[in-house]
Image (cartoon, rainbow, N blue to C red):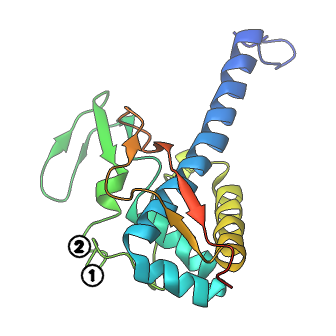
Amino acid sequence: MRDEHDGRLSHDELAANIGLLFGAGHETTTHLIGNGLLALHRHKDQWERLVAEPALAESTVEELLRFDSSVQLTSRKALEDVTLPDGTPIRRGEAVMCLLGAANRDPAVYPDPDRLDIARNGVRAISFGGGIHHCLGAQLARIEGEIVFRRLAERLPGLTLEDTEHPTWKPTITLRGLIRLPARWDQQVA
């Protein structure tokens, strides 16, 4: 418990926050890169476009966050009674499961949502949550992703993945990421 007199976190609270920041800041960005490389190589035309136009790295990250988010779901507890637009009531105290991965593929928001398009306009993926629950490290993850994808496209244009059809996924529900992603590159490709 927090010491009420000086506002400092207890040892347990500090350890929990460090664990949260490490997991949220490292694992999700790692999955963004792995999931993104897999998606780009499953849609080879998009990898080739990024290699030809590395300046698309920023929009590539936004599209990859939408297309295959590291965080697939989250839950919240309703603080008050609400009724959804379709008439579904949610009572105060009820748990609500938010399927971020599904929302990022909503055809009412994104035309042809199952198509990867690294130059797609108007991407507003909810992969980092929103409101008071918006991810603290969202901008850092975007910057890291942009640097990684730009540099890979510029420096390793001949990068290929060993097996894009049979990846090994981590056995989790909330976080979506690969256990490994074997790759190789042809150094002769410039």
Element under disc 1: loop
Label 2 sits on residue: 107
Q: Position of residue 109 (x, y in %)?
A: 30, 74
Q: Nearer the viewer, residue 100 or 134?
A: 100
Asked if residue 125 can be seen in this view, the reply is no
The answer to the question of whether label 2 and label 1 lie on touching residues, with beta carbons closer than 8 A, is yes
Circle 2 residues within 10 Å: few <14, some 14–19, many ≥20: few
Point 68% across, 34% down: residue: 22
Residue furthest to the bottom in view is 52
Residue at image point 47% right, 49% down? 70
Disc 2 element:
loop
Q: Quadrant of the image for the C terminus?
A: bottom right
In this picture, is 16 found above or below 69?
above
Q: Amino acid at mark 2?
A: Pro
Q: Position of residue 101 (x, y in %)?
A: 35, 54
Disc 1 target residue: 111
- The reply to whether residue 68 is visible in this rendering is yes
